[in-house]
Amino acid sequence: MTATSSNPPAAPSAASRAGGGLGMAIPASMLAVLGALSAFGPLSTDMYLPGLPAMARDLHTTESSAQLTLSACLIGLAIGQLFAGPFSDALGRRRPLLIGLAAFAVASALCGISPNLGLLLALRFVQGLAGAAGIAIARAIVRDQTQGLAAARAYALLMVVTSLGPIFAPVAGGLLLHVTNWRGIFVTLSIIGLLMLASAAALVPETLPRQSRHRGGLTATRAAFGVLVRDRRYVTSVFAGAFSTAALLAWISGSPFVLEHIHHLSPQLFSIAFATNGAGILIARQIAAHFIARAGPAAVMRAGQSCQAAGALGALCFTLLDPALLPLLVCVFVAVSSVGAIMPMATALAMNDHPEHAGSASGLLGFTQFTLGSAVAPLVGIAGVGSALPMTLTMSVCALGSATAGLALRALSGTSAGSAPARR
């Protein structure tokens, strides 16, 4: 059973205050590694984006087919989290994490030598499947160590490191294209995977004691998922984050073709434009962190959702009325940056009520986000490379979906919508 705290935002529950000693609960070095693990999604999807058009030419396929490599990775990231989270509830956090990192390094290297699109799609799926362990288990480790407002702060700090992925990954990819091709980018991802394996082995201890682990195999997993999907607050929080992420992934998938084909930016200029939005995510995260204790995670999330919807709708209007580049970039910057305020808060709200199923809660959350994202990615190229309308329309629909979920969560929470729920 869960209970919703009726304390005002300025006076969090005793449990939340007890979890407020974040620096003691999670060492800075460990938190940095967890943030880097959370960045496996943007690293896997963003670094090779500047080389996506060249990949299509090299593999003798269409731009839309090349975008399927993004969808394949997203599907792997989704399904992988659905399994990695429950496995970590049963086996502990450390062992599944290290296995996933090793598999990511191997799959990334094989992507770099793939001779055709079919094999590359399969390997991208495996790459996502393996990388999902880092994402899901990092969230579960944070929930093992913190709760309430302290967890919201921790997830926001993870977002700092995660935000560096969209900032540096496309820039690094563009720079790598000066000395190598898209295949070399995947080799670089393999090296990153090996470095993360070494860092996790050295700095991330086991955080789930044996007595707290679940037994019962699939039966226990189904029971945990049943508890989660019947919790309307959990489900609504998950969809609030998932739709916001889908709007971001619509931009990620469509931006190489919109900026390079329609607006004729070089891969290097594309990388700079793309990285600017990553910096915006970081800025929004800093603003959100400032207001967490004062307004509460749910209120901060709703403010971010309003900004994202406004930015996405503005991008759609400018696409219809004036296809100039600068207005589009400004509106997209607002829409994409808002993810930095939405995602940490949605994650904290979803994870807080279920510490006994932290891995399963994290896995189902990630599965929903990346499944929706993988469905969105092909839609942005449905009109070919000559129109930005599918991308901006998809972003707008997803942003409005996130905002609607935020309002539904407020209705469910009543007067305590602005405060993080506390597990009694």
Image: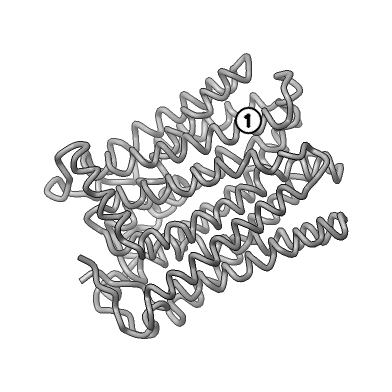
Left or right? Give the position of 57 relative to 205. Answer: right
Please provide percent x and percent y for residue 411: 42, 75
Q: The residue tagged with tag 1: helix, strand or loop? A: helix
In the depicted structure, whether residue 252 falls above or below residue 396: above
Name the image colouring.
one colour
Q: Quadrant of residue 222?
A: top left
Q: Is residue 170 visible?
A: no
At 32% across and 46% down in the image, what residue appears?
204
> Which quadrant of the figure contains the N terminus?
bottom left
Please provide percent x and percent y for residue 305: 57, 67
Q: Is residue 226 visible?
A: yes
Question: In terms of depth relative to the viewer, which is nearer, 350 or 35?
Answer: 350
Left or right? Give the position of 28 relative to 4. Answer: right
Q: Quadrant of residue 79?
A: top left
Please provide percent x and percent y for residue 326: 84, 59
Type of amino acid at the residue the image marks with label 1: Ile
Question: In terms of depth relative to the viewer, which is nearer, 107 or 361?
Answer: 361
In the depicted structure, whether residue 389 falls above or below residue 344: above
Q: Residue at the far left: name it.
A: 211
Please provide percent x and percent y for residue 99: 34, 31
Q: Which residue, given by chain and number where applicable, does mark 1 sit on?
A: 185
> Which quadrant of the figure contains the C terminus?
bottom left
In the depicted structure, whether residue 298 falls above or below residue 71: below
At 65% across and 35% down in the image, what residue appears?
48
- The crowd level at tag 1 (other Cα within 10 Å; few <14, some 14-19, many 20+) is many
At 40% across and 37% down in the image, what residue appears?
80
Q: Residue at the far top: name it.
A: 115
At 54% across and 62% down in the image, what residue appears?
402
Q: How many marks?
A: 1
